[in-house]
Image (spheres, rainbow, N blue to C red):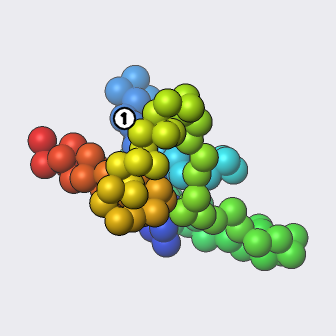
Amino acid sequence: MMEYKGYFARVEFDDEANIFHGEVINLRDVITFEGESVAELRKSFTDSVEDYLEFCAERGEDPEKPYSGKFVVRVGPELHKTLVIQARRNGKSLNTWVSDALNQVVKSCTQQ
C-alpha cells in the first residue's frame, strides 16, 4: 500500500509485462500509475496525484476528498435497537459507541 497526500494506492506486479501498476483506491475518480522499479513507481504515483489535483484546479473543481468521515450503515431494526441500548448503557452517543467499537476491531485486525 502506498500513500501520498491522503490518497492510498494498491500496487500489483504484472510478471508478463515485468511492470508494477497501481491504482488509487480511496476515490471514485480513477487515478492509475505504473513503473518498472520501486523508485519509478513512487514517482509515477506522486505525479499522477499531482496531475489529478492540477486537473481539478484547471476546471475550477474541488478534488474529491479521500473520505468525509461519514458513512451510512444499514442494519435491521432489532440490531439498531440493541446498538442504541448498548451505547446508552455506556453513556455514549450511538455514533461514538459505534466509532469506538470499529476502532477496537481495526486494532485487533492490525495486530494479527
Location of mark 1 (residue): 13
**Residue that extends furthest to the right in the rendered view of this protein:** 59
From this view, report whether residue 24 is shown above or below residue 54: above
Q: Residue at x 46, y 33 (%)?
A: 79
Residue type at mark 1: give it. Answer: Phe
Q: Residue at x 40, y 23 (%)?
A: 16
In which quadrant will I find the C terminus?
A: top left
Relative horizontal placement of residue 51, taking residue 15 as reference (left or right)? right
Q: Where does the image place residue 31, in percent across and percent down from the top left?
A: 62, 51
When the figure is inspected, residue 42 is found, relative to residue 78, above or below; the finding is: below
Q: How many marks?
A: 1
Is residue 2 or residue 69 the one in the foreground?
Answer: 69
Q: Is residue 94 visible?
A: yes
Query: Residue placed at 47% from the left, 56% from the top?
Result: 94
Counting from the top left corner in percent of width and height, residue 68 is at: 60, 64
Q: Front-most of 75 and 63?
A: 75
In this rendering, would 104 be left or right of 97? Answer: left
